[in-house]
Each structure stands twice: as structure tokens, then as C-alpha cells.
Image (cartoon, grey):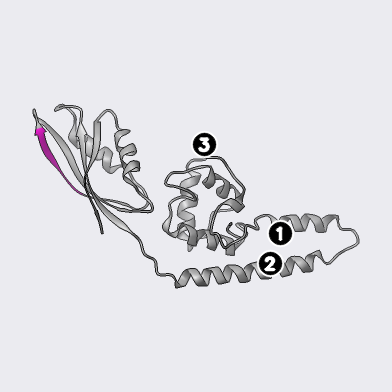
Amino acid sequence: MGFGDLKSAAGLRVLNDFLADRSYIEGYVPSQADIAVFEAIAAPPPADLFHALRWYNHIKSYEKQKASLPGVKKALGKYGPADVEDTTGAATESKDDDDIDLFGSDDEEESEEAKKLREERLAQYESKKSKKPAVVAKSSILLDVKPWDDETDMAKLEECVRSIQADGLVWGSSKLVPVGYGIKKLQIQCVVEDDKVGTDMLEERITAFEDYVQSMDVAAFNKI
């Protein structure tokens, strides 16, 4: 597993393809896996690698909280596509060896051969990846968001819910539905990409607005 050399353009392209249908390196929340890969990148990816750049800027926003993110940081070879080998840092190590080789050697020639082989493998991977049709599974979800009582500011409650932004999440129409005793619940529609956004994440984020939200339920769930 790996992304090739993350300090090279080819390695960043592999990362960009890997993140085309993912928000994070592993799972559905930022973790130490994202930090491990983020720290291996020398600079922000170029604008044409928009999946990688979007992920890079998002993870950068967690810089002050990175130590508290879940998971255990592992070697780069534990992440990424299964058919690509991690070679990040190999070029630097080779250069260091050259600096102390007073009598010269054929290490540089071997390094060039290894680099050529790596580039060929990455090209094969990208070619195979490009031939696969991109199928994005989506679902339409109808949520019931219940307030604490009839004095809850429902406009503010809806504003809080719609403030939740995530890659693969699009909010739709909403309405207030009476539930009794003058209390109304917010019924709101959203469309999600299944691999990026789940109902557990939505419930966790919505119920975090505990001053307004008592609970959240899934009223309807339909595959698109």
C-alpha cells in the first residue's frame, strides 16, 4: 500500500485519485491517518489536483487539534491504494548516501532505474483507474429534528442544522410539522454520497446543537 512518492507530482496524482470518492484517508472523520499523510506532503497540491487540494486545506484547518484526532499514526505504507508502494523519502535518503560516498558508486544509476520503474507502475495505475467508471452511490434522507419545547427558536434551529457542511452533503427543502402541545419539529431533506456521509455523522453533528435540539430521527431513507 502507499501513494508512491508524495513529494513528487506522480505521488500527488495518486493521492488525488484516491480522494476522488473519499473525504478522508480512513473512515468518515479526520484522524491520525490524515495527519500522517498530510505531514508527508511538502507543499499544497496544485489547483488541478482539486480532490487532494480540498483534502489538504481541510486537514490543515485541524493543525492545532491534530494531536487530539482519533486513531494511531502508522507508516505511510499502511495507507492508500493496495497496488501502489510507498516511496516517500526514498529520493532524500539516496541523496544523503551520495553525499557521504567519497569514492562514487552506481547507487545513482540504480536510483534512476527504481524511479523509472516507479513511474511506470504509477502510470499503469492511473491508466487502470481512468478506465473505471465513476459510480457514486447517493441516498435521499428525510430527517426529523425535535426541539426541547415550544419556546425553542425554530428558525435558529434550522440555521444551525444547515450550517453543517461536508463533502457529499447537500441540504434540501424543509418544513415545520406540529407534534402537539404547540411544539413543532423541523423536517428537512438532504442528499448524501453514501461513502462520505452517514446518518450517524449527521446525528452527532445535529445533536451537538444541544441548546436547540433534543433529538434527531431518520423519517425516510431512499437510495437514489
Label 1–label 2 contact, CB within 8 A: yes
Disc 1 target residue: 91
Helix, strand, or loop for circle 1? helix
- Marks counted in the figure total 3
| Residue 76, position as x, y percentages in the image | 60, 51
Q: Residue at x 28, y 54 (%)?
A: 139
Tell me which amino acid carries mark 2: Lys
Tell me which amino acid carries mark 3: Lys
Residue range (magenta) = 173-179
Image quadrant in which you'd find residue 180: top left
| Residue 13, position as x, y percentages in the image | 53, 63
Relative depth, front residue between 71 and 109? 71
Helix, strand, or loop for circle 3? helix
Where does the N terminus fall, quadrant-wise?
bottom right
Reply yes or no: does residue 124 show up in magenta. no
Disc 3 target residue: 64
| Residue 203, position as x, y percentages in the image | 30, 39
User: In this view of the protein, can residue 29 be seen by the observer?
Assistant: yes
Quick one: label 2, few (<14), some, or many (20+) residues within 10 Å? some
Tell me which amino acid carries mark 1: Ala
In primary-sequence order, the first of circles 2 and 3 is: 3
Above or below, 126 relative to 146: below
Does the magenta stretch mainly form a helix, a strand or a loop?
strand
Whether residue 9 sits left or right of residue 204 in the image: it is right
Where does the C terminus fall, quadrant-wise?
bottom left
Relative depth, front residue between 216 and 57? 216
Q: Residue at x 58, y 51 (%)?
A: 78
Quick one: label 3, few (<14), some, or many (20+) residues within 10 Å? few
Q: Marks 1 and 3, Cα distance to the nearest angstrom?
A: 30 Å
Above or below, 70 relative to 128: above
Disc 2 target residue: 115
